Amino acid sequence: MFTHHLIRLPRLSRGLATHSGPLVAVPGSLHLTTGQSFNGRSFGAHKSVYGETVFSTSITSYTESMTDPSYRGQILVFTTPLIGNYGVPHNSAPTDSQDVGVVLESQGIQCAAVIVSDVAEKFSHHTAVESLASWCRRHDIPGVTGVDTRAITRLLRDQGTTLGRVAIGAEAALPPPKENEFWDPSKENLVDQISTREPYELNPTGSIKIAVLDFGAKANIMRSLIRRDAAVTVMPWNYDFNSVRDQYDGLFLTNGPGDPLHCMEAVLKLRTTLAEWDSPVFGICMGHQIIGMAAGLDAYRMTFGNRGHNQPVLALASAGSIKAGRVYVTSQNHQYALKLQDPFPQGWEPFFINCNDSSVEGIKSTAESGKKVWGVQFHPESAGGPLDTIEMFTDFLNECRAHKSAALKESAWSTVGVVSPMIKPRARVVVAAAT
Ligand SMILES: NC(=O)CC[C@H](N)C(=O)O
């Protein structure tokens, strides 16, 4: 065990006096299961936690990242040195008539702890109501500052995502835990801990009915759907969608925390959906991994994953607003990815590839398959991050609308006993009436 960084003296002169009382120098440390320790000072809850230590290269949107349910169980290290300078907004004020109940990405802070090189002790923004430190304390989330986050990140890039413990107060000075005492969140079904227990509706008067399987959804996915006039029914991740699928015009699978292998129940149910239902399906991050596994691809654990808002992806195929050959800058937060295999399963093709590490960033059904199914590893809904691929939501809903009106015409023609000349008959039998 060696120590990378000594405890820095707290900057009492700058203090937190304006917003939350003077900062008392409480020690805070990050211990890694591989033996390294980083000693700084605490700025959040006075509580020690275990988790998986990951780093994010995002420069802004710490509030959105920290409320993203996909960070559940993770000790989030920000590579940007100064975090907290625009404070934290009120999280429950409606932003518009299509309010989803929160301003940020979920009700509370989802990551297990945060590690910041230099936490901003003063904040300034017209929507801010409190400091990062006070927000963390209110949500019982520990934070450590005054550590060399560059050194931590270099370590994580070499040795991969590593189990860690954030130790606060007297515990920070104790020897690090033994290797077998670290908690490994990837062993748990984190999705089941946060997915909705019961289905619920948003924007029920919307013009197209979309079912959303909730693996730990970011609120901006729901906003992105309902702002495009979708009526959304959010369902538990393992809901029996096949028993209600005929009531919906499209299926959406959300992001979510942890290892996708814990969600095999959803993979198997989706396999049935894809075999028997031909309405459009779209999945993001965990949702994309579930679609890929249902298609027959394998998922694997990456060394340190991709987390940040500056990940370039190259489109390999065109679809809707996406043009083959273009690079899109994307928001990402994932540890697992689909394995690139040659040949791809029949009826599927790669859609995007990561320009940095060549990992699979998207898959789609082929034109020949007659299906409209896409999955993307990145987050088109952003929050935070660039909006380069936001129109994929419009593309998905356009396909749902086109499919719905084609199906309506088809059933209108079949009730008068003629096979529509405009509709290519699918595997489904079109009932030919007499006379
Ligand atoms: N944001 C996500 O949906 C993450 C998916 C999955 N938990 C992973 O880490 O790869």
Image: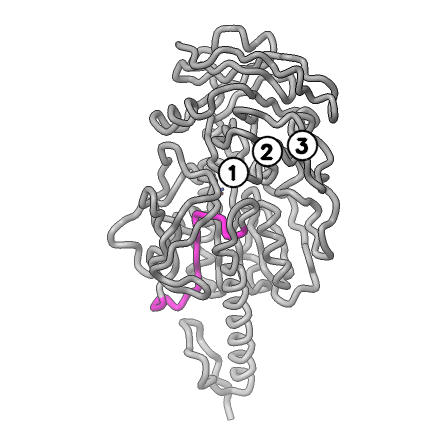
In the picture, measured across the screen, residue 344 lies left or right of residue 307, that is left
Quadrant housing the N terminus: top left
Per the rendered image, the range of residues in magenta is 367-381
Helix, strand or loop status at disc 2:
loop
- Name the residue rendered at 66%, 15% in the picture: 12
Q: Amino acid at mark 3?
A: Phe
Q: Please identify the residue farthest to the bottom as the structure is shown.
A: 435
Task: Identify the mark at residue 59; answer none if there is no mark.
Answer: 1
- Rendered position, 272 above or below 66: below
User: To which residue does mark 3 refer?
Assistant: 123
**How far apart are labels 2 and 1 at the CA level?**
19 Å
Residue 286 visible in image: no
Q: Amino acid at mark 1?
A: Ile
Q: Please identify the residue farthest to the left as the structure is shown.
A: 342
Helix, strand or loop status at disc 3:
loop
**How far apart are labels 2 and 3 at the CA level?**
22 Å
User: To which residue does mark 2 refer?
Assistant: 110
Helix, strand or loop status at disc 1:
loop
Answer few, some or many: residues within 10 Å of disc 3's Cα (few below 14, many 20 plus, some between 14 and 19).
some
Residue 434, position as x, y percentages in the image = 50, 89
- Name the residue rendered at 65%, 29% in the picture: 132
Quadrant of the rendered image containing residue 146: top right
In this orientation, which residue lies closer to the viewer: 124 or 427?
A: 124
